[in-house]
Amino acid sequence: MEHPDHPLVCWHCRRPVPLPLRLELGRKTVYLNSDTHLYPWHVRLDPEFDFSRPVGAVGQNPQNPRIWGLRNCSETPWVATLPDGTLRDVPPDRSVRLGPEVRINFGEVEGIVRGAPEVPGGAP
């Protein structure tokens, strides 16, 4: 299997196949698609498989649908570190823009976004 950052090549046309952004959360990896939700199990150290209520959801910016973000659906604020080192608070019901090397501290776990900056078709 190829490394996730190396492009896959279509067997038919030989063009690179773009992969979506992914959120690495320690040993867990979540691919970020238009319908992706994060659950307590993803962002806690507790090994219990808790999928009771989403704590995060991928969505488009209402003013610019080409911009994708991760909305905080939890009751706890997050802290995001942008690639330039800027810290951003992400309170409940607010979003952080998704892009490579964005770090998000969910409290117990910190995640880092990896992958290509843009996927054709506008999806993350």
Image: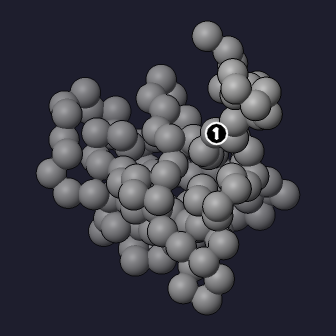
Q: Residue at x 51, y 49 (%)?
A: 32
**Which residue is found at the position 65% from the left and 71% from the top?**
67
Could you say which is closer to the camera, residue 86 or residue 58? 58
The answer to whether residue 74 is left or right of residue 103 is left
Farthest right residue? 84
Circle 1: element type? loop
Find residue 5 and report its horizontal and vertical position in percent: 73, 29
Q: Residue furthest front?
A: 12
Query: In the displayed structure, would residue 4 be above or below residue 87?
Result: above
Q: Say if 29 sits above or below 109 in the image.
A: above
Residue 21's quadrant in the figure? Answer: top right
Q: Is residue 50 above or below residue 57?
A: above
Quarter occupied by the N terminus: top right
Mark 1 — residue? 19
Q: Quadrant of the C terminus?
A: bottom right
Q: Specify the farthest residue to the left.
A: 52
At a point 70% along the width and 56% down the height, the residue shown is 120
> What percent of the width, then of the height, locates residue 71?
45, 68
The answer to whether 36 is drawn above or below residue 10 in the figure is below
Q: Position of residue 113 (x, y in %)?
A: 63, 45
Decide which of 67, 25 is in the foreground and name it: 67
